[in-house]
Image (cartoon, rainbow, N blue to C red):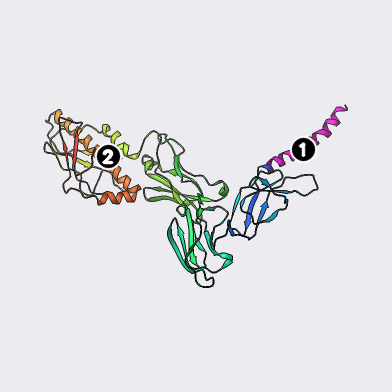
Amino acid sequence: MLGNPQSSTVAPGRLVMWTLAALLLLATLEKPVLSLHPPWTTVFKGERVTLRCDGYHPLLLELRPISTLWYLGHVLLPSHKKTIEVQTPGVYRCQTRGAPVSDPIHLSVSNDWLILQVPYAPVFEGEPLVMRCRGWYDKVVYKLHYYHDGQAVRYFHSSTNYTVLQARSSDSGHYQCSGTMRIPVESAPMFSSKVAVTVQELFQTPVLRTLSPPEARGRVVLRCETRLHPQKRDTPLQFAFYKYSRPVRRFDWGPEYTVPEPEVEELESYWCEAATTSRSVRKRSPWLQLPGRGSALDLASTTAPALQALVPGDKPLSFRKTPVSRSVPSVTSVPNSTFAGLQFPAGHVPTVGPHVCAPLPTSVEQSREVLQRKVDLLLREMQLLKGLLNQVVLGLKDPQAFRELTETPETPNSQVSVSPGTPETTVVQGGVDI
């Protein structure tokens, strides 16, 4: 009888303690934010800057104020205020009670006539990158040049900040500035020290994946997957889907796209794109790769044995294909000296997919041996076609490689000589080696 009231009075106390412990644990996961004012990592000797530590404090029952710890390197500074003024170079960090140590800020002090100032905070893709070339104690700098990895990128008549409106990863590197000052007459050109700048990746290159196997009956859903930087995890992204160069769904919030049933067999022609809402950062995925099926070009060799039986005859076979949405260089195959081979009209190359062999009217009395030789020739021609398609796809993915490929002089009459007695040997003159 007496035990029940005691247990009822203890339980709420334990609940309060557990709640406070949970809040304290959540608070310890938040890292304080250290900021610098003015926001430049390099200053002149004797100048003072302000550091501010903004932390997340747990709920405590104590009445005393929560102090802030400051570190210069591994040395604990005597101040416990939220902001401090410093002029000593080094690596600064701060810490609030119940929280881990903040990210560092490296402060440099220079005694040169000219310094290049860059922001202390990380710059992400699509954000403005601002640099400032500053003369000794704000003297005006004339004939001002900014350099990126040793190359001049901008010139100004006098002191002006250099701004990259939408930074890219290619803007990372070492920067430097040069100019003259009137002290009291105009000096010779002076150079600042080089400063390393790194543009952070906002999100990773997207990858297109399937949510259901393509062999299954029903819907096939594609997902465009990427990952934001931890400091930018709240940045909204939009996604678009393409088949070859044609958009099948323009930018929208959903990272998934349902493939229409008639186009399920052409999944490897799809790719996607991820972008910010302002389109300041856009990244495209590689072509869709289906697990266990290899690349799209491998289908040319895997579908060759599935050709239907051909009607025997010694007349040439015409090779038909499905329509192609991309233009490719013209390829012509000339029949060899033994018998007629496959002929491709100029400007047309068979694409990957189901091929149809339409026999011309022939005599049914031809021997089986002639038919077998024609099938062997067809398979070798398809291997040649596979190599040509590999080069075309390489050119589409790498325009520079495509230009070099098209600039290569070609023999007017490309010939493919096949020896019937040696099926393993194929000699290509003026064309592509298989």
Using the image, tell me which numbered label, if any, was put on residue 17: 1
Instruction: Find numbered disc 1 in the image and state the secondary structure of the residue it sits on.
Output: helix
Using the image, tell me which numbered label, if any, was put on residue 386: 2
In-image side of 415 versus 70 (left or right): left
Where in the figure is residue 380, as x and y percent of width and height?
22, 35
In-image side of 122 versus 323 (left or right): right
Amino acid type indicated by mark 2: Lys
Viewer-proximal residue, 434 or 16? Answer: 434
- The quadrant in which the C terminus is found is top left
Image point 75% across, 45% down: which residue?
Answer: 59
Amino acid type indicated by mark 1: Met
Q: How many neighbours does mark 1 have within 10 angstroms: few (below 14), some (14-19), or many (20 or more)?
A: few
Q: Would you place residue 152 above or below residue 232 in this image?
A: below
Where in the figure is residue 61, as x and y percent of width and height?
79, 44
Instruction: Find numbered disc 2 in the image and state the secondary structure of the residue it sits on.
Output: helix
Image point 33% across, 48% down: which residue?
Answer: 396
Image point 45% across, 63% down: which residue?
Answer: 154
Residues shaded magenta: 2-27
